[in-house]
Image (tube, helix red, strand yellow):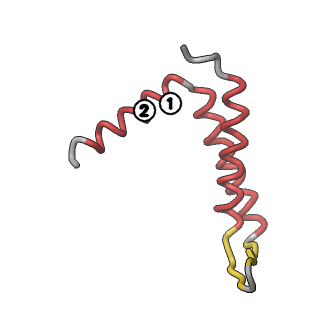
Amino acid sequence: MRGKIPSATQKVAAAAKARPAETKWSLIGAAIGALLGLLIGGVGITAMGGAAGAPAAIILALIGGVLGNRYGVSKDRPVR
């Protein structure tokens, strides 16, 4: 188990270095989404007769991260 964590960390760092725009825009999108979510507050999620509250910051951070990632992919050059 000890060898897997540093190995995974090195793989993530190598991927981030190989695709800098993708990484940058993913983080920017997640940050903007989280800030907008903090302004909104919370949202209710209902399904099958039940309801649960969820912080909008988490939901919008995930959505912003995905959108930022897609934009970053379009800005990066193809990795060969």
Q: Is residue 31 left or right of residue 2?
A: right
Give the residue at x 39% y 32%.
Answer: 11
Above or below, 5 against 61 in this view is above
Which of the 4 image quadrants contains residue 12?
top left
Say few, some or many: other residues with alpha carbon within 10 Å of mark 2 (under 14 / 14 to 19 / 20 or more).
Answer: few
Among all residues in the image, which is located at the extreme left?
A: 2
Q: Position of residue 79 (x, y in %)?
A: 56, 17
Q: Position of residue 73 (x, y in %)?
A: 67, 28
Residue at mark 1: 16
Residue type at mark 2: give it.
Answer: Ala
Residue at mark 2: 13
Q: Looking at the rendered structure, which numbered label has been put on residue 6?
A: none
Of residue 7 and residue 49, the one placed in the foreground of this image is 49
Q: Is residue 5 left or right of residue 32?
A: left
Above or below, 41 against 37 in this view is below
What is the secondary structure assignment of the residue under circle 1? Answer: helix
Q: Position of residue 31 (x, y in %)?
A: 65, 49
Give the residue at x 64% y 62%.
Answer: 58
Q: Is residue 8 left or right of residue 50?
A: left
Q: Which quadrant is the C terminus positioned in?
A: top right
Among all residues in the image, which is located at the extreme bottom?
A: 49
What is the secondary structure assignment of the residue under circle 2? Answer: helix
Say few, some or many: other residues with alpha carbon within 10 Å of mark 1 (under 14 / 14 to 19 / 20 or more).
Answer: some
Residue type at mark 1: give it.
Answer: Ala
Q: How far apart are the alpha carbons under marks 1 and 2?
A: 5 Å
Contact? badges 1 and 2 (CB < 8 Å): yes
Which of the 4 image quadrants contains residue 78?
top right
Among all residues in the image, which is located at the extreme front?
A: 48
Give the residue at x 30% y 44%.
Answer: 5
Q: Position of residue 51 (x, y in %)?
A: 72, 82
Of residue 45 and residue 54, the one placed in the foreground of this image is 45
Above or below, 54 against 38 in this view is below
